[in-house]
Amino acid sequence: PISVVVISQMDFLRWCG
């Protein structure tokens, strides 16, 4: 689902930060 993709992106941004 889309929510999984959004959470994945947020997690990636958190890792990048």
Image (cartoon, rainbow, N blue to C red):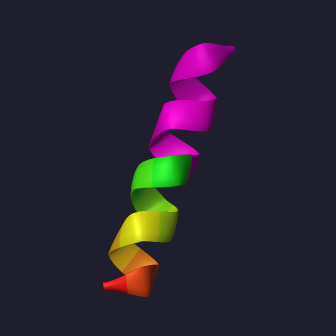
* Residue 11 percent location from the top left of the image: 45, 61
Q: Magenta segment: does it hold 9?
A: no
Q: Residue at x 43, y 81 (%)?
A: 15
Residue extending furthest right?
Answer: 1
Placement of the N terminus among the 4 image quadrants: top right
Residue extending furthest top?
Answer: 1
User: How many numbered marks, from 0 up?
Assistant: 0
Q: Residue at x 34, y 72 (%)?
A: 14
Q: Residue at x 51, y 67 (%)?
A: 12
- Start and end of the magenta stretch? 1-8
Placement of the C terminus among the 4 image quadrants: bottom left
* Residue 16 percent location from the top left of the image: 43, 83
Residue 13 to residue 4: above or below: below
Asked whether 7 or 17 is in front, the reply is: 17
- Asked if residue 1 lies left or right of residue 7, the reply is right
- Asked if residue 4 lies left or right of residue 13, the reply is right
Q: Quadrant of residue 4?
A: top right
* Residue 5 percent location from the top left of the image: 62, 34
Residue 17 to residue 7: above or below: below
Q: Magenta segment: does it hold 3?
A: yes
Q: Residue at x 49, y 34 (%)?
A: 6
Residue 6 to residue 14: above or below: above
Q: Please, what is the dominant secondary structure of the magenta stretch?
A: helix
